[in-house]
Image: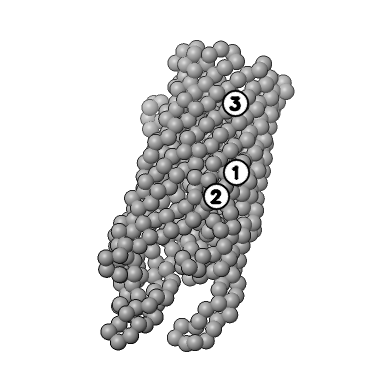
Amino acid sequence: MNKNFLALGLAAALLAPQVAGAEGFAINEWSAEGVAMGGARMFAEDDAANVAYNPASITKVKGEVMKSSYTYLSPHGSYKADIKESLKPGTNETIPAYPEYGHNKVHAGWAVGSYYVRQINDKEWFGIGAFPRFAMVSEFERASKASTNAFFSKLNGVSVTPTYAHKFDKKWSAAVGAEINYVGLELQKNLQMKMPVETPVETKIATIDGTTQIEGESYALGWNAAANYAFDDKNEIGVVYRSRIKHSLEADLKGYNTKPDLMGGGDVFGNAYGVVTLPDSWDIGYNHKFDKKNRLELKATRTNWSTYDALNVYFDKSLVGIPGIAESSPSAKNWSNGWRYAIGLEHNLSDKYTVMAGFAFDESSIPHDGGDFMVPTGLRRTYSIGARYNDKKQTVAVALGWMDVGTLDFAGHPEKGDAYSSAHAYDSFTKIASISYQRKF
């Protein structure tokens, strides 16, 4: 029964759609209890989701435990784009600059986590989890000017993390694990541009009004390590390191009606290649037990987003039909490293019922020149609450959260095809709801 349970949970985690839940495209919503405590859940007792939040804390699990978690996220947001001055098609008449207002299409999704922990003996534990660390999705109206930068963007990701933990004594425990990381990437944008085309008589200005789609997937390896130290029965600290992961992505390229109108239009199909490096991160946590009923967790996460310096995609053929010339789509990002801070409270109403609350603050890591409509988000504040029921064999937890997303101003790059000179994202928020179920064997 337990093997079937684990296999079903891993399959659900791999197949479920994901959406972003933290600054950049990081995900922190790995269990209902974690959502309820703002992600500050590094020292939970008897919780299989410790595989995700703090592998060194799987030494707090007694016996054999399995857990599944499902978190619903629904992002919303609006934007204003400043459209550059242009010529009316077929004339010399100038269209003045003007603002375009719009909003993202809501793509609600699920962050699914599945976990298994087994105590081997008094000193050793084994755990494995399947959960998303990075994911995002955004979509805008096809006819909008924003679509010349990013019409539809989706990153599906899941990490499978086999973990070994050792408890040295009453104060020290540590863990080390591998990470098998999957990424599925899809990017769509409108290609709207004018270019000179040589004809037998003269050079004419041709129009391109098409759509490009890049879709591919990749697997890569990483690792993690963690350690806990208990000062006494009430105070404990922990640290978790997760390595950066480099993906070499091979993708299918589809260009619809991307050839100039003077060449009769047409579609182009080929291959694309790009490299994406997911950042490494550090988690530092502190746990304080006031008494048997109340405890407080503090957590700070340092994510080295500077690894996301560019998203350059290279093609094996020309999108606009120039023989013998392969093109590329360069895009500098130059994100900065950033911090996420969280605080979580847990209060035991009785032996069976617990309530939780949390708050998290994400710094913005996106510079003005590196912002885009793929991830148009600024700083974030997340407020959350939750409750849990448990008996000797099972635990059920639920949580609700509200993520208030700050504004973001970013530049357009007309020289690279953007039909706007600058953009302002605002009125952005994400609704969060989560449920977890855990069973002991």
Mark carried by residue 338: 1
Distance CA(mark 3)–CA(mark 2): 27 Å
* Residues tagged 2 and 1 counted as in contact (Cβ below 8 A): yes
Q: In front of the other: label 1 or label 3?
A: 1
Q: Residue at x 50, y 12 (%)?
A: 122
Closest to the observer: 85 or 65?
A: 85
Amino acid type at circle 3 is: Gly
Horizontal side, residue 211 vs residue 76: left or right: left
Vertical relation: 111 (above or below) 368: above
Q: Is residue 305 visible?
A: yes
Amino acid type at circle 1 is: Gly
Q: Secondary structure at mark 3?
A: strand
Q: Residue at x 48, y 70 (%)?
A: 143
**Percent x, y of residue 98:** 60, 75
Q: Secondary structure at mark 2?
A: loop
Mark carried by residue 238: 3
* Residues tagged 3 and 2 counted as in contact (Cβ below 8 A): no
**Percent x, y of residue 323:** 27, 68
Residue annotated with mark 2: 335
The numbered mark, 1 or 3, whose residue comes first in the sequence reads: 3
Q: In front of the other: label 3 or label 2?
A: 2
